[in-house]
Amino acid sequence: MLQGTVSCAPVIAMRAASSRSMLATPRIARRSFATAGGDHLSRILPTKRPTTPLNHSYRPLDFVDFRSDTATHPDPPMLASMISSSMGDDVLGEDGDTKLLERTVADFLGKDAACFVVSGSMANQLAVAAHLVPWGRLPTTVVVDARSHIWKWEAGGVSFLSGATVIPVLPSEPSEPSRWSHLDASDVSQALIRDESDTHVAPTRLVCVENTLDGTGLHNFTSSTILPRTASHPYPHLPVHLDGARLWNAKIKRLLGDYGATVDSASLCFSKGLGAPIGSVLTGSEEFIGRVRRLRKVIGGGWRQSGPLASACLHSLKSSLPGLHYDHFAASSLAAQLSTLGSSSSTSSLVRLAAPTQTNMVWADLGRLLASANESSGRAVSGTTGTAEERGKLTADDWARHMWERRRVRVGTGYGDKGEVVRLVVHKQNREAVGEVVEGLKEWAEMVVG
């Protein structure tokens, strides 16, 4: 050995001895660890696999939910389809059922490509970002319907994720309340910022629309009804994104391909009314969807074995989609019965429909009923201040509480300017119970009005 060097032999020998010791006693060490109570996994994990057949362990909700069609849930046949699905890696583009679902929806809408994502909100946000990416970080504006999901219910995602300024617009159609009409070209043109030379403003790069919107469908849906495409408005091509979360309901009146031909991108949701547990599909051109897939990965939306979820969506196209017209029929029946609801002391209806029932949503205004109830009981005391609850006045929430406590039925409240409008959404798993809503409201009206 050269002078001044240090031998590594002792260290190597110590490591070898340590390795032999570790290899010789692993079972004893694990046994003593478990005996000492340190193996917490053995206490929380099941000791046996469940042996109950799938259809016997299926536990549907023990109440009826009219708050939204997002309350629909998989039934045993759909769960069985999930078990027998493909198990490829979607991030690598290798899952068969996911690719089949994307191709199916793209064909429905007449688009070149599609991407399966977690939710409708993710589909919308990815669509906005993918449309704006070519403009880099330049200031931009996005024109949206002021009542749309993108503007009201997605946590400011357009500004936060895409850095764009949002211009919310309400329709100016005078023939019906603006809440229930749709944007047209004149509404959009007034909000567009198209002056590229003015550095004081952010040009509009995208228009977003929604169909159906609050249960009302825009059936005369063409490019000319959304954007001004006339000689007097020679705008260059401006992309339009369609939030079609409930476009399945508009399909009753028109082919999906007709809607798809009108816009540059469109999304469809499978967990609203169709009963799939999760998932939306965003469609567009090959280039556009290529950007969508990259952006999906950026925000953590890339998923691996997506086959079971895609299979549930595919199953819903066969099992749920053909029955949507039954939801519409049940909703129309519910609306008709509520609009004729009276009481022994009233000759006029106590319930007014706040919107036309075109699809599966019923908007019932309980204002007259609540006013009669509060007046007959002396609750409407003039000169008092505070909220209705503080004044002891009955509200729509009181009826909702009655429905829950007496009939195990959930209804949606808090709509309208005064909170007197309730939303009742009919779907395949509550359509047989619309009579419960009618009888429950009659029962409550007799109790509070007489």
Image: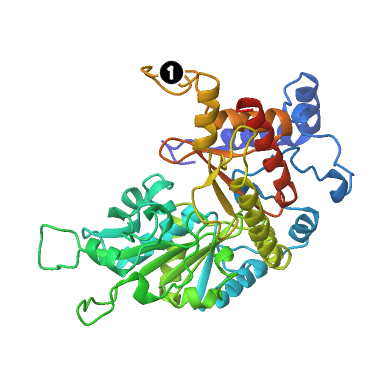
The quarter of the picture where residue 409 lies is top right
Which residue is pictured at 68% across the width and 41% down the height? Answer: 437
The quarter of the picture where residue 443 lies is top right
Which residue is pictured at 36% across the width and 46% down the height? Answer: 156
Q: Nearer the viewer, residue 220 or 255?
A: 220
**372 lies above or below 64:** above
Q: Nearer the viewer, residue 261 or 392?
A: 392
User: In the image, residue 294 lies at what x, y percent?
Assistant: 43, 63
Q: Is residue 172 left or right of residue 302?
A: left
User: In the image, residue 138 lies at what x, y percent?
Assistant: 21, 60
Q: Is residue 96 left or right of residue 363?
A: right
Which residue is pictured at 81% across the width and 27% down the height? Answer: 31
**450 lies above or below 186:** above
The quarter of the picture where residue 449 lies is top right
Sort mark 1 into few (<14), some (14-19) or many (20+) by Cα contacts within 10 Å. few
**109 lies above or below 78:** below
Residue lying farthest bottom? 231
Q: Amino acid at mark 1?
A: Val
Colouring rule applied to residues = rainbow
Q: Nearer the viewer, residue 107 or 24?
A: 107
Q: Nearer the viewer, residue 161 or 75?
A: 75
Residue 210 seen in the current view: yes
User: In the image, residue 211 lies at what x, y percent?
Assistant: 47, 63
Q: Which residue is mark 1?
A: 381
Q: Secondary structure at mark 1?
A: loop
Q: Quadrant of the C terminus?
A: top right
